[in-house]
Image (cartoon, rainbow, N blue to C red):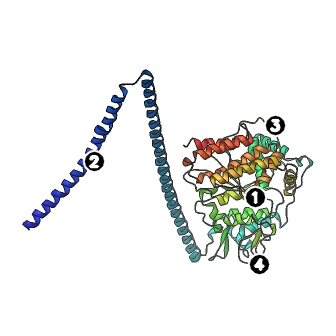
C-alpha cells in the first residue's frame, strides 16, 4: 500500500506539473508575441522613421488611421453578425418552446373533451337521454321528439321546414342592378350609415376581388380592426346574414366541424357549420360562412377536405360526405348521404397572429385570398344607404365582365415575369400556376372596383409571394432583400408597389 501511495503521489505531481507547464508555455508565447513581435515592430518603425520627411510622416499617419478604421470595421461586422446569430437562435428556441407549450395545452383540452363525451355516452346508454337535443326540447320535449322521431337530423329537418323544401329565388330591383365600382361605394355608405362600421375603399375592393378569385378568404391582422364585422356587414348588405362559426382549439378533423353519427342514439351530432352549409342549398343569393379565429386549431387538419373539394373543376363533384347512406326521414337535400355544395357560398376565415394561434400553412394560403386589416378606417360621413338584394348569377356575371374588359396588359405581365424570375433565382420562391391564375382574376376585378392594375398586382404579390419569405433565414439575406427592393423600383417606379416595399422595409428593420 505504501508503494502505491508513492506511485499515485508522483502521478499527481507529474499531472499538475504538466498542466502548469502547458499554461506557462501559453503565457510565454503571448509574452513573446507582445514583447518580441510588437516590440520588434516598434523598433523597426523607430529605426526607419529617423529618415522620414514631413510627407513621409503625413503618409504614415494616414496609413495608420486607415488600418485602425479597417480593422475596427471588421471587428464591428463580426460582432454584429454574432449578435444577429445569437438573437436568431434565441428567437427560434423561444418559438419552439411556445409551440410545445401550445401543443401540450391543446392536447389536454382534447383529452378533457373526450372525457366529457365518454361521460355523455354513458349517460345516454344508462338513462336513455339524448344530450344533443336536451336544450332544443326544453320548451316542448314530447312534441319535438315526435316531430323528428324518424330523422337522424334535427337541425337540418328544421331548415327543411323553414324553407318548405323550396329554393328561395332573390328578386332584384332595378336599383340593385349596379356595377362593381358603385357596389363598393354603396357598401361603404351602407355599413357607415346603418351599422356604424367604417371601411377603406381599398379593403372593400380587395374583398369583392377576393370573392371572384377564390371560394376561401382569410382576413388577418391585429385584433379590433373589424375582421369579423366585415363579412357580418356584407351579409347585412346583401340581405342574407353571414353565419359566424367560432372555431374551437379542439378541432382536429372534419368531424369536429361537420359532425358525426352518434352510435348510441343513432342520431347525427349536427354542428352549426353543417346547418349553415345546408341552408345555402335553399338559397340563390350571396352566402357567407365565417370561421371566426380559424387558426385557433390547425386549419389544414379540419378544413383540408373542403380545400381539396373547392379545387375540383367539376362543380357537380362538390359533394360533402355526411353519412354513408340515406334513410327515410333524412333531410330533403341530403342525397345519398351527401350535400352538394352550391356555387353561391364563400368561406371567410378570420385570423390573429399571436402566441395562442397556429401558423397558417402555405397549403391554405395558396388556395385562399388573404386580406390584411391592420388599422381602423377613418370616419365616413355617409348618407343613409339601404342594402341590396343580389343573385349569385348577377354577381358572377359582373366578375366575368370585369375579367374580360380589364385583362392585365402585356407590359405589366412582362414586368411581373421579370420579378418572378428574380424571386425564383434569389429566394427559391415562385408564383406557381395557381397563384398566376388567381392574379389574372383578382387584378381585373380590382380595376373594375375602381382601383388600378399596379395597385392590385402589388396587393397580391405582397400577400401571396412575399409572405412566403417568413420561412427563410432573412437575417442572412440582406443583400438579396435590398436588390429585390431596387428591382421593384426599377420595374414599377418609386411611388408604386407600396405594399411590397413596405413589407421589405419591415424585414430590413429586423437586421
- Residue 504, given in percent of the width and then of the height, sits at 63, 43
Task: Give the mark, 1 or 2, whose residue is nearer the N terminus.
Answer: 2
- Do tag 1 and tag 3 residues touch (Cβ < 8 Å)? no
Q: Which residue is mark 2?
A: 26
Name the element at disc 4: loop
Can the viewer see residue 195? no
Front one among 134 and 372: 372
- Residue 444, given in percent of the width and then of the height, sits at 82, 49
**In the orientation shown, which residue stands out farthest toward the top?**
54
Image quadrant holding the N terminus, namely bottom left
- Residue at horizontal 24 percent and vertical 51 percent from the top: 22
- Residue at horizontal 54 percent and vertical 67 percent from the top: 116
- Residue at horizontal 57 percent and vertical 41 percent from the top: 509
> Could you give the CA–CA distance between mark 1 and mark 2, rounded to whole angstroms?
71 Å
Depicted 114 relative to depicted 441: above or below: below
* Number of residues whose C-alpha sits closer than 10 Å to that of mark 3, classed few (under 14), some (14–19) or many (20 or more): few
Circle nearer the viewer, 2 or 4: 2
**Which mark, residue 383?**
3
**In the orientation shown, which residue stands out farthest toward the front?**
51
> Could you give the CA–CA distance between mark 1 and mark 3, rounded to whole angstroms?
32 Å
Task: Give the mark, 2 or 4, whose residue is nearer the N terminus.
Answer: 2
**Which mark, residue 215?**
1
Circle nearer the viewer, 1 or 2: 2
Q: Which residue is mark 4?
A: 328
Name the element at disc 2: helix
Front one among 472 and 238: 472
Task: Give the mark, 2 or 3, whose residue is nearer the N terminus.
Answer: 2
Can the viewer see residue 44? yes
- Residue at horizontal 54 percent and vertical 71 percent from the top: 119
Front one among 176 and 119: 176
**In the orientation shown, which residue stands out farthest toward the right?**
174
Amino acid at each position: 500500500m505504501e508503494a502505491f501511495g508513492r506511485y499515485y503521489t508522483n502521478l499527481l505531481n507529474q499531472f499538475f506539473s504538466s498542466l502548469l507547464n502547458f499554461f506557462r508555455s501559453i503565457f510565454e508565447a503571448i509574452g513573446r508575441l507582445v514583447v518580441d513581435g510588437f516590440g520588434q515592430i516598434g523598433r523597426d518603425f523607430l529605426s526607419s522613421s529617423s529618415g522620414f520627411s514631413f510627407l513621409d510622416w503625413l503618409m504614415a499617419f494616414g496609413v495608420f488611421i486607415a488600418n485602425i478604421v479597417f480593422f475596427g470595421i471588421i471587428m464591428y461586422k463580426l460582432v454584429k453578425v454574432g449578435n444577429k446569430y445569437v438573437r436568431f437562435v434565441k428567437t427560434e428556441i423561444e418559438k419552439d418552446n411556445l409551440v410545445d407549450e401550445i401543443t401540450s395545452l391543446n392536447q389536454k383540452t382534447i383529452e378533457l373533451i373526450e372525457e366529457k363525451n365518454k361521460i355523455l355516452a354513458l349517460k345516454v346508454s344508462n338513462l336513455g337521454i339524448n344530450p344533443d337535443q336536451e336544450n332544443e326540447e326544453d320548451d316542448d320535449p314530447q312534441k319535438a321528439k315526435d316531430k323528428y322521431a324518424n330523422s337522424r337530423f334535427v337541425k337540418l329537418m328544421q331548415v327543411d321546414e323553414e324553407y318548405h323544401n323550396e329554393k328561395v329565388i332573390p328578386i332584384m330591383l332595378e336599383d340593385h342592378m349596379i356595377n362593381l365600382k358603385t357596389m363598393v361605394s354603396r357598401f361603404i355608405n351602407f355599413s357607415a350609415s346603418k351599422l356604424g362600421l367604417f371601411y377603406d375603399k381599398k379593403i372593400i375592393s380587395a374583398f369583392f376581388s377576393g370573392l371572384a378569385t377564390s371560394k376561401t378568404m382569410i382576413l388577418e391582422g391585429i385584433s379590433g380592426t373589424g375582421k369579423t364585422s366585415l363579412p357580418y356587414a356584407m351579409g347585412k348588405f346583401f340581405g342574407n346574414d353571414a353565419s359566424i362559426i367560432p372555431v374551437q382549439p379542439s378541432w382536429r378533423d372534419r368531424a369536429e366541424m361537420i359532425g358525426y353519427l352518434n352510435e348510441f342514439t343513432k342520431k347525427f351530432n349536427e354542428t352549426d357549420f353543417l346547418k349553415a352549409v345546408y341552408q345555402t342549398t335553399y338559397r340563390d343569393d350571396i352566402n357567407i360562412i365565417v370561421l371566426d379565429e380559424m387558426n385557433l386549431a390547425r386549419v389544414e387538419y379540419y378544413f383540408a377536405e373542403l380545400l381539396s373539394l373547392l379545387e375540383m373543376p367539376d362543380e357537380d363533384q362538390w359533394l360533402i360526405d355526411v353519412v354513408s347512406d340515406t334513410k327515410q326521414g333524412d333531410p330533403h337535400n341530403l342525397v345519398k348521404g351527401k350535400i352538394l355544395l352550391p356555387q353561391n357560398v364563400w368561406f371567410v376565415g378570420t385570423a390573429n397572429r399571436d402566441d395562442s394561434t397556429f401558423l397558417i400553412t402555405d397549403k391554405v394560403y395558396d388556395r385562399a385570398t388573404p386580406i390584411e386589416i391592420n388599422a381602423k378606417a377613418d370616419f365616413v360621413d355617409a348618407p343613409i344607404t339601404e342594402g341590396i338584394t343580389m343573385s349569385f348569377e348577377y354577381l358572377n356575371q359582373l366578375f366575368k365582365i370585369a375579367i374580360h374588359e380589364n385583362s392585365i396588359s402585356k407590359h405589366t405581365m412582362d414586368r411581373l415575369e421579370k420579378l418572378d424570375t428574380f424571386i425564383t433565382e434569389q429566394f427559391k420562391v415562385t408564383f406557381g400556376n395557381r397563384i398566376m391564375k388567381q392574379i389574372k382574376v383578382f387584378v381585373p376585378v380590382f380595376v373594375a372596383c375602381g382601383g388600378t392594375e399596379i395597385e392590385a398586382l402589388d396587393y397580391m404579390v405582397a400577400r401571396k409571394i412575399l409572405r412566403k419569405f417568413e420561412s427563410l433565414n432573412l437575417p442572412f439575406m440582406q443583400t438579396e432583400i435590398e436588390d429585390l427592393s431596387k428591382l421593384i423600383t426599377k420595374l414599377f417606379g418609386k411611388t408604386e408597389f407600396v405594399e411590397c416595399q413596405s413589407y421589405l422595409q419591415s424585414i430590413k428593420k429586423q437586421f
